Amino acid sequence: MKKTLIKSDVAGIVAEICFNKSDFVKEGENLIFIESMKMEIPVIAPFDSEIEEIYVKKDEVISQNQPLLTLKS
Amino acid sequence: MTHKNKIKDLEKLSFKIEEMGGSEKLKVRKKAGYLNARERIDLFFDKGTFFEIGKFVTSSNIHDKDKTPADGKITGFGKVSNRRVAAISNDLTVKGASSSEMNTKKISFIKKSAEKLGLPIVFFGESSGARMPDIMGAKGMSQAGQDNTQYIRTRKVPWVSAILGPCYGSSAWYSVLSDFVVMRRGSVLAVSSPKVLSLATNETIDPEELGGWEMHSQITGIADRVVDTDHEAISLMQSFLSYLPSNNNEIPPQKKVTEDSLKKIDEILSIIPENPKRTYDMREVINLIADEDTAFTMKHDFAKSAVTELARLNGKTVGFIGSNPKFNGGAMDPNACDKITSFLVFCDSFNIPIIILVDTPGFLIGVEGEKQKAPGKIMNFMTALQLCSVPKISVILRKSYGQAYLNMGGGSNSDLVIAWPSAEVSFISPELGVWVVNNKKIQDNDPNYNNYLKKMTYDNSALELARSFGIQDIIDPRNTRQYLINALETLDKKIAKHNMSNWPTTF
């Protein structure tokens, strides 16, 4: 079992969290949208996995490199 | 001895040389699924076209005479799709393909000949570094560095490298000096091997961590593409060369166009979200504009907020540069600047026209970027763009903001700038303008906020940009392909000035 911590590439505001803890996601799916630089930037699943933990809430202000979630694969 | 006997002896020796480091070593490789140095050459070149140079060379160390067939580096010329190419193939079964006095001479001969003849050079990389004990001591070192042009890269001819095993020393150097690098998973590229490190610095490190495919495709960007087999690597090298001229005095070869290339552009409207905050993948746009199945991605997994792809347009090679909204909304970071800069230099050096597809909210700003020298990277990018003398056409799809507007070819930084009706162009957003100038945010509930905002809100539309001649035309997105084909016919200057041919390959 491999655990992967996904961090935010950008600073911004969490606009939408598309899944819940324990959901299974497919590679390429949008996990979270971060509003930043006039855009809703998707955080994309790098591979098929299960969401083990989500560390942020909707509307939360986040910084670059802040942990967003952990994936289990 | 008769002529015939002499020839027989020569044939025997030739056969022995082709056995390389011996059947045992070759068997181990075969079992692991790796091609050997000669199989790579056979697979790469058109059948029967390879002729070897320096086959009978051995180590200058007389004790190693019989242990060093071709001295561990197989060199020569052949044809790929009927075009001549020079090759250097490292034979790991002979003293780890280590660099020696004699095989350095072979490489030098091939490189100089290829430049003189105007032929691309391919490197099948797999080498352990300098040969020991030959290089040891002052006397050994005095033999090194005898070719004072050895590491000059002037981009007169294309260089293509494959990382197909451990690449330390020679293979590492030539890979990073190349225009295209493909890496087989499980290979390692680094200055020195983990074994050297373990004693020199007491650092025990996993080879993958030191210089594996993830490191070089995602973090350093040295590897353009990653594959699982030697076969795939060789096929990509051939494909890459098909886009390029043999040298910088030629234009790229032209190919036939399939009929489907003409039809698919109509899908373009369905890819671009009408909500300007939503993202899409710029690579899909390139696929629709370019001839069918011709997009060839460079630095595929590196700095994904920028896209750099070779492709064909009406059969002619073009270089597509794009910001990619799918990653970081198309906000480019310092690595994305490096990626685009190196692609600009490459296209300009080999007479490849450039098409810039723009949808970016600006450069990604922040502390991280500043630590990575963002201002310097943005200016490198800008310098390269302004030094480019191949035709440049910039297409503004949606957003083009701030300094990135200029970097992506805005103003006079392209020969032509055109826009889609969905384009929006400005310095920064009106809200940000009010914050900078009036020191107010919407949350401050200032009674004058709306007035401030009104004063900052200007028409940022494509039409306003066209009216003030900031662009030369506004087009229906579905006409993009045909517009670009027509425009390139008009702008084509054939051979560029090559002002950046000696720009560093890594910076």
Image: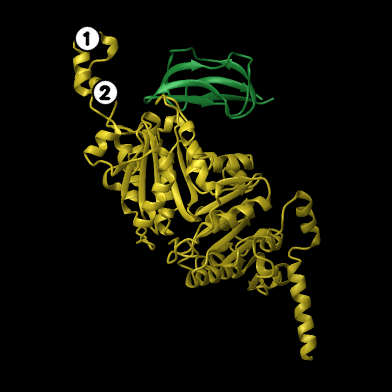
Chain shown yellow: that is B
Callout 1: residue from which chain? B
Q: Which residue is mark 1?
A: B446
Q: Quadrant of residue A11?
A: top left
Crowd class of label 1 (few under 14; some 14 to 19; many from 20; radius 10 Å): few
Q: Earlier in the sequence, mark 2 or mark 1?
A: 2
Closer-to-camera residue (B60/B351): B351
Secondary structure of residue under mark 1: loop
Q: Quadrant of the N terminus of chain A?
A: top right
Residue at image position (33%, 37%) is B404
Residue receiving disc 2: B430
Which picture quadrant has residue B420?
Answer: top left
| Amino acid type, label 2 | Pro
Q: Which residue is found at the position 38% from the left and 38% from the top?
A: B476
Label 2, label 1: how far apart the Cα atoms are: 16 Å
Q: In terms of secondary structure, where does tag 2 sit?
A: helix
